[in-house]
Amino acid sequence: MLNHAVLVRGFWNEFLYFCRAKFAVEVVNGIRMSFFNNFIAI
């Protein structure tokens, strides 16, 4: 039972880390895109 809980917790942490990394990449890409669009607009 204890091992199962640890396994689930580890999987959840990996999942959250993956989501956070993906979100960070999306944010960086969004900022970079808006920056380039503003640069082109000027």
Image: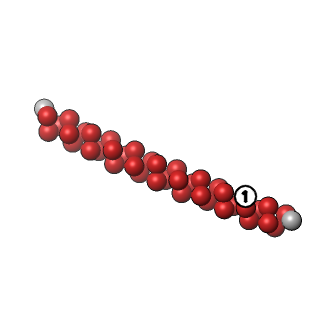
* Secondary structure beneath label 1: helix
Q: Position of residue 4 (x, y in %)?
A: 17, 37
Q: Residue at x 65, y 56 (%)?
A: 30
Q: Position of residue 27 (x, y in %)?
A: 59, 53
Left or right of residue 34, residue 16 in this image: left
Q: Is residue 10 above or below residue 1?
A: below
Q: Residue at x 21, y 42 (%)?
A: 7
Q: Is residue 23 above or below residue 39?
A: above
Q: Position of residue 41 (x, y in %)?
A: 85, 63
Q: Which residue is mark 1?
A: 34
Q: Quadrant of the C terminus?
A: bottom right
Left or right of residue 34, residue 15 in this image: left
- Colouring: secondary structure
Number of marks in the image?
A: 1
| Label 1 neighbour load within 10 Å: few <14, some 14-19, many 20+ | few
Q: Is residue 26 above or below residue 7?
A: below
Instruction: Give the quadrant of residue 34.
Output: bottom right
Residue placed farthest to the top in the image? 1
Asked whether 39 or 11 is in front, the reply is 39
Q: Residue at x 69, y 61 (%)?
A: 33
Residue placed farthest to the right in the image? 42
Amino acid identity at mark 1:
Ser
Q: Position of residue 29 (x, y in %)?
A: 61, 59
Left or right of residue 42, residue 8 in this image: left
Q: Quadrant of the N terminus?
A: top left
